[in-house]
Image (tube, helix red, strand yellow):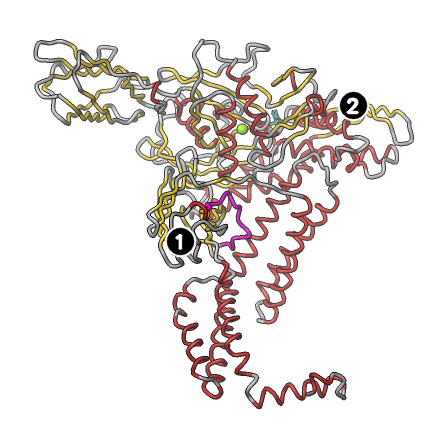
Amino acid sequence: MTVNFGIDLGTTNSVIARYHQGTVEVFKNPVGHKETLPSVVAFRSGRVLVGDKAREYMEKDPRNVIGSFKRKMGTSESFWIESIGETKTPMELSGLVLKELKNFVYTGEVLESAVITIPASFDTMQSNATKKAGQAAGFKEVFLLQEPIAASLAFANKEGNEGFDGRQWLVYDLGGGTFDVALVRTEYGEMRVIDHQGDNFLGGVDFDNLIIEHIIIPYLQTQADFGDLERELRSSSGRYNSLYYVLLKKAEEVKVSLSAQTIVDVEFEIETPQGKLLDVFFPVTREQFEDCIREKIADTVEMIRSILQRNELKAGNIHCILMVGGSTYIPLVRRVVEQELGIAISTAVDPTTSVAIGAAYFAGTKKRITAEDLPEPVMAGNLTLRVKCAYSKVSQDPEEYFLGQAEGEWQGLFYRMIRSDGGFDTGLKEMKERFSEYLPLAPNRHNAFELKIFDAQNNLLYQDSSIGIVSGKYGILGQPLPNDICIEVDDPENNGTKLELVFEKNSLLPLKKTLTKEVTKTIRKGSDERLIINILEGTNIATPGTNLSIGIIEIKGSELMIDLVKGSDVEIVLEISESRDLRISTYLMMTDQEFTNLFSPSERCVSHGKLEDEMVILLKELDREIGLANEHEEYELSQSLHDIRNQLQELHRQLCRMPSDDVTDAKFQIDDRKRNLALRIDALTKDKKNTRIKEEYFAYKKWCQQLLDNHGNEQEKMRFMDLTASEKQLLASNSPLLIESAIKKIREVAAPVQWRTPEYLISIYYHYAEMDGEYTDKGKSR
Ligand code: ADP
Ligand code: MG
């Protein structure tokens, strides 16, 4: 039995669709008959409203109406709801939307499993939160599918869209809250995402905000003195905070109208701080709106350019750019994307439902794994026989290879395979342990087959009617991992860490890897000591600080049966499922203990204060890097770092201007940008930094060697030899932190030796003597 239900759980709108025998149906809201359900939840006098009903209260009662929560998915942020005096997490709110979508399904089916889509750029925490939302809504099984793949499936499976094999295209998905672009290729009827890029904080809601910021606020300021109006609007304690929600809705209406018209009027009332009621009425032109968003659209084009560049592709290699998401209705978006890139855009699929449609196609190929849902093959008497079947559930070919493997008492039996429309019948064939058939497929539809097994007397003993193959539709080859997954081994002795790549970005899920690591410190049985392994998501070239920590593995001394001695081996097995569940188990060779399900995922926590601290540290680090670059006459590098510094300072200004109780998700946007800048600093300076620090290492080593040759004792020489013995490994680690700590150790060996050299003592003498011309410190002078 297959999953069949596909859900687009969008930032702004959610959609549910069902696959049935080769076609997909999008369900309509029984109330209002719309295909989309606004992802908005309202809490009103003990009742929970979801969708359009909730949206109606957005202006009247903004404190009890929540939308755009998908953008905070996987973070520690939650929403305070006044009317119930409780907070709700983005995950819980999404669960409510999913529950409401279940009501769209009129067929009476019990929904226990579904495919839910996520942006390709969702990290592990965000993916996990989405799965949990599904579970909260009562789904026993949730499969995740990346939105661009879903849209591509809808596109390629659309009737008349044949001849996709060997082609590649881009999916441009600009919705309410996120932007995603993906490069998709079809080979042998299977589709896969080759590369992708996105911004979790770029979409229609930002355009609405830009209209407020660049058109409405400046206009209001010409009408009366509103002081810091932006702050008063966006701060939850601000005087105009409720008006902010009214304006957001107005701005959206303006934006949507401007997709069809070139000029629209804005109208609302506002009371000035001076107590005057102002009737606001003024026109907004399409050009004005386009000026607001031009820069954002240019950003999306840049992302496409970098994807093309990374994959060494030219415009001519791309079949088309598939436009998905409500914001692609904006004429400027279509125009700029097509003109700037010189690639034809396609508006073949419905921008608002295609993701759900594609998710349903995928669901149609996905077998349910919950054991109780599996159709039990029919068996007669006390015969023990089981047949495992292997075949591709989607096919572009006129026939598909089927392989059966029998277990149990199969000797002397016969099998027969029949296509349910009567178009094919193998007739009775003698059973073997492994048997195979080429099943001919009726084109462009769901082909159901039956496998029947008979004894020599022609009694039916066994029947499996769940074999189904869809022909003429595209499947997907697998979903790629959106970021590198790395581990960082806690290493307090070297006071440094390095990242080790576990899974590489764009590898196809599911993935599994076994690593063997040496324990870096002794953990005594029963003690409070612990071994901590940090799991990070990001790029593996970066230093741990710039990546996102997604969780830790922790083994406590109290759980050990015997001491875990430094240098012994730990085996770590990491697995990621297709739905991005990360499972980690650890085997301690020495204690022969196995720990499973060790992984505790973290939530993304961004606090105003922490963010500011991090930025100040980053600015300091950047200054140091700029200084070093100048010192080494690396002017190009210095210039690039300066540019980053300017951007970082601008971000810092934005953060300082932001009220600490800001109701938007600006904080997360700033955190995202900060992390991206940190990554760029890393990428720019890593090589140079390594070269410099290695030079420094060799200089110190030579100096220390000479010092020891002339003044060192045997013990000191031994220590030095020890230190430099593993030099090869150290340099190969390419970890500035490790090399730096090695230098520190060399200096520690050298320090006492230095105090025994006359030259050094003389230089110290002069240092004090010249400092202020006379000895003021008796101790030092002695
Ligand atoms: P999501 O995938 O984020 O749930 P959608 O793909 O449904 O979102 O897109 C919703 C966004 O599209 C909203 O910001 C909405 O204002 C915008 N939108 C919908 N229709 C239009 C239109 N005709 N012109 C401009 N923007 C539109
Ligand atoms: Mg969407």
Q: Is 524 drawn above or below residue 245 in the view shown?
A: below
Looking at the image, which residue sits at the far front? 526
Residue 208, numbered circle: none
Span highlighted in magenta in the image: 542-554
Q: In 3D space, how far apart are the residues under numbered discs 2 and 1 (Cα atoms)?
A: 73 Å
Can the viewer see residue 466 in this picture? Answer: yes
For label 2, the residue is: 267
The C terminus lies in quadrant: bottom right
The amino acid pointed to by label 1 is Asp
Taking the magenta stretch, the answer to whether it contains residue 544 is: yes
Residue identified by numbered label 1: 563
Residue 97 image point, x, y percent: 56, 21
Task: Say which element carries label 2.
Answer: strand
Q: In the rendered view, tell whether residue 714 sits above or below residue 36.
A: below
Could you say where residue 643 lies in the image, as x and y percent from the top left?
A: 63, 56
Residue 412: which quarter of the image? top left
Query: Considering the numbered disc 1 on the image, is that residue within a helix, a strand or a loop?
Result: loop
Which quadrant would the N terminus be assigned to in this image? top left
In this view, 731 is above or below 5: below
Which image quarter has ligand 1? top right
Instruction: State left or right for residue 442 relative to residue 416.
Output: right
Residue 591 vs 603, above or below: the answer is below
Near mark 2 (Cα within 10 A), the count class, few <14, some 14-19 or many ≥20, is few
Q: Is residue 417 left or right of residue 322?
A: left
The answer to whether residue 133 is left or right of residue 420 is right
Total labels drawn: 2
Mark 1 neighbour density, 10 Å: few (under 14) some (14–19) many (20 or more): some
Give the image location of residue 209, x and y in percent: 69, 33
Q: Which of marks 2 and 1 is nearer the N terminus?
A: 2
* Circle nearer the viewer, 2 or 1: 1
